Every structure is written in structure tokens, then in C-alpha cells.
Amino acid sequence: MEQLLAASTFNNLKEGSLIQATVTEIRENNVVVDIGAKSEGMVPVAEFNDISDIQIGSQIEVYLEKLEDRNGNPVLSYDKAQQKKNWETILTNCEEGKIVSGRVKGKVKGGLVVNIGVDAFLPASQIDVQPPKNLDQYIGQTYDFKVLKINLERKNIVVSRRELIEEQRSDKRKKILTDVKPGDRMRGTVKNITDYGVFIDLDGIDGLLHITDMSWGRISHPSEVVRMGEELEVVILEVDSERERVSLGLKQIHANPWENIESKYPIGSRVKGKVVNLVPYGAFVELEDGVEGLVHVTELSWTKRINKPSEVLKVGDEIEAVVLGIQKDEQKISLGVRQLEANPWQMVKHNYPVGAHIRGKVRNLTTYGAFIELEEGIDGMVHVSDMSWTRKINHTSEMLKKGDEVDAIVLEVDSDQQRIALGMKQLNEDPWNNIERIFRIGDIVKGKVSKVTSYGAFIELKENIDGLVHISQISEEHVERVKDILKVGEEVEARVIKIDKDDRRIGLSVKAAAYDESKLAEEVKAFDRLSKTQDLTSLGDILDEFANK
């Protein structure tokens, strides 16, 4: 009789119909039910929103997909039964534009499947304001959706979560623009990072956090401070309701470190910091977040010749310095490293008094003088005019070369300007002070030709004094070119015919070397008259002309 009844019930079951089933067993992944068929059927646990609502013996309605599978078991679905029952209700109560609640079931091509009583399609572009990269994060979540489209023939429903979010954001944006004011604090999420700043999503409106308002300290790019998706607390700096723009600040969360800068870093105090940047003219040192001081290259050492700070410092170095000055309005602090040690120039006047005889090595030569190293970092300079009493020097290389050991006399000391003036010629008495005891008019002198010019020739005499043989005093015959008669290095005999102590000149005559006293006297008078009536080139002028040839 039982077999006959079972066969009768089985014959009444139709595929695609809703049938009553009795729960006989609840397993880990399936719920076993009896539908009066030859064998029991199984419904996946995942099809139940809350499995705790299902009890053994409970009556549930299921959808019969197949009477038998390959194993002879019926194929059942609780979810499809609910959808079949709900479809009529959905069509009756749901219309385009209406808000419905649903649970995301899974992924399909182009979006997600959402159970709103029946399966609905949620396109990826309608999930959020920004299309998400990972759709898995939504599976199993319940949200409100807006019905976009219902296709009755195909029984398709398209929903959107994005439209609801945008509507909510629009309401929030209006509220923010109306309610917030400069100085208010809000929390937001980093939405976009650019070279000039960061856009912050304030859950309704995007605010701009400019790079200059991100930190009191030095930053090169906003990415040094924030990262995408990070949540931040920011300060409202400005609200433009008409253009719907909000300017934000991050550094304003903290007090301006420059507010009481003079009391924190008084002038003369010692400070410690980290080198954060090197430039040709100095090193920037971070004293605290937002406060940097500059050590100018001239303030790195009293004595070392530092051309650029990278010679002695590198980024990241922890150093100590002395505060030299503060410009609060310009947010500048001047620092010095050399002030940590005693200034050796303060002892220069004591170590090298005026008149002292010193010895040093030639460190450098210039057109105007030679630098003599007295000790490490302390140089004195011998000007070209203080190298010789008698010679006209056009360049220091005529007298010295680098590395020479020389003697000199201290002429002047200026500790403030860090200058020491030296003289070499002062080691000896000026021969021109007693020139009349060295040379007299009429003296026969001998010397070598040192220079030849178009005006005449210079003869190197004793005491390193040069005399000039004017072209008119070379020969009784007319001389067209001096170099045809006299050569550099040639030894000549001449007579002193003029001594000008004021102009420090000696006139010589080769042709008068053999004159007797009377004829010499006439020549001296004639030459003296010629000197007064004609612009005879001075010793210095001829030397200059010679040097430029």
C-alpha cells in the first residue's frame, strides 16, 4: 500500500512546479528534504539567508528543477522557489525608480547578481561612484538599490547603488556648503593625489588640500605625506558655495612652529638638527618639523676654504650649530657651524703684529698679488706694488711661483675682514732714498739689456735698478729701430745723464760713454732740455707698453 501511495505521489510531481517539502536532516552544506518522491532531495545551505530559521520537521516550499538527476535524486532549489513566488509580488509592488533592499549573491560578467526577492543585475558601473577594482568585497553584503529598469518579457531587473550614493552625496554636499565654516574640522578620504595637492572626499564633496597647506616643513610632493585611500582629519580653510569648492588644511591641525620661534631658538644658542638639503650656497638644517635653518657656506669654517657645502656635509648628517639670526616673517633662521669653535682670526693681531718678519709658502697667484699661507687657513697677501722698490711688476708670476717659500713684513692686520697685508720690498731699504750715493750724473755704468721697446732699452743696473737708454741716446747716428742695435741680454756700457728721484727714473746714454767732461756736460743739458720740452715716455709707461706687446 505504501509503495502504491509513493508511486501515486511521484506521478503528481511536475518539473518547474512549487512543491511542499519536509526537512528531514540538516547537514554542513545541504538541507535534506522529503518531497514524496522515490528518494529525498537536497537544497544547498547557501540558499537560505539564515539557516538557524530551519528546523527538522519544518515545512518549506521548494522549486522542482528535475525529477531525477543521474543518481535518481530530485534536483531542488529553495532560492528559485522564493523567486518564483516573489516574481508576482515584485512586478506588483516594484517599479522603476523605487528603492529596494537586496543581498549580493555573486559575480557575473559585467557586474553582480543581487537578490531583491528575485535575481536582479547590478552593472559594475552602478556599484559605486568610482567603479571598484575588486567585486568580491561586495558578495554577501546587503544594500539599498534603486530600480533602473524592469523587462517584463525577459523577467530582468537592473538596479543601481551608485545613483543612491550620488543622491545622498548631493544632499550631504548641500549641507556641507551650508553648515561648515572656516576653522571646522572634518574627516575625509584621500581620493586623488596630484603634483600641486590632494583631493579629499568629504563624503559629499571633494575638497582640495594644497601642497603648501600639508606640512609646516619642506615637502617636494604630496605623496610624501599622504597615500591613496588614507583617512585624514583636515581643517576647513575656505568655502566657496557658488563654485562648490572647499579649501582644506592639514598642517593647521598643529600649531605653527614659527609662532614662538625667538624664545625656542634664541640668538647665540646652540641647536642640533639634520641636514635635509644641500645647495651651492649652503646647507638647510631641520631643527624640528616645519623649522629649517640655513648654514651659509661662509659659516662652515673659520679657516678651511670650502667652495660648496657638499665638501664637508651630506644629507642626513646630524650636526650642531649656533643661531646667528632669525627672520620670523620670512621664516628664516641663519645658523653657523664655525661659531662652535674660537675664531683663530681673533689671535691674528697677537700672532702677527704689524712689522713682524714672517715666512710662508706661496699658495696662490693673481694679477694683483700673491697669497702667502702663514698657517692653516690664515693667508696674508703681498700686493704687486709691495714686491719691489725698483721694478715695475705687471704680474706676480714675474717674481714668484706657487710653492715658493718667501719672507715678508706684516704691514696691516684687519681681523674683522680677515685680511693681512704683507710686503716683500719692506725687507730692504728703498734704494731710491739714497740714490745719489749709488749713482751720480756722469758715472760710467755697466749692465745687461733687460727690455727693448720702441722708445728705447732698459738696462739692469746694481741694486736691481733699471735705467733707460732713450732711442736718441743709443748712437751718434740716427736709429730707426732700437732692436736693430740693442738685444735683450746684451751687456752695454753707458753713462748716467739724468737722475729723477721723484719719478724714480735714471736716464742713460750709450753714445756719451766716451765723451769728455765738456761734451758730457753739453749732452746732459741737451737731454734735460729735451725731457722738459718733449713727453718722453716714463719708465712705467714703457714697461706697460712692452708687457702688452
Image: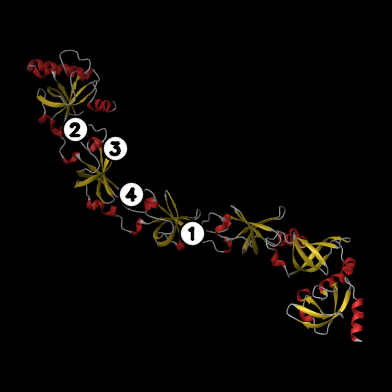
Q: Separation of disc 1 and disc 4 at Cα? A: 28 Å
Residue 255 located left or right of residue 369: right
Is 214 rendered above or below residue 413? below
Judged from the image, the secondary structure of the residue bearing numbered disc 4 is loop
Residue 471, position in %: x, y? 20, 18
Q: Mark 4 highlights which residue? A: 305
Q: Mark 1 highlights which residue? A: 291
Q: Residues within 10 Å of mark 3 (few under 14, many from 20)?
A: some
Identify residue type, mark 1. Answer: Val
Foreground mark, 4 or 2, reads 4
Which image quarter: residue 408?
Answer: top left
Q: Residues within 10 Å of mark 1 (few under 14, many from 20)?
A: many
Question: Which badge, 1 or 4, is on the more N-terminal residue?
Answer: 1
Q: Separation of disc 3 and disc 2 at Cα? A: 17 Å
Q: Residue at x 74, y 77 (%)?
A: 29
Q: Separation of disc 4 and disc 2 at Cα? A: 34 Å
Identify residue type, mark 3. Answer: Tyr
Q: Mark 2 highlights which residue? A: 390
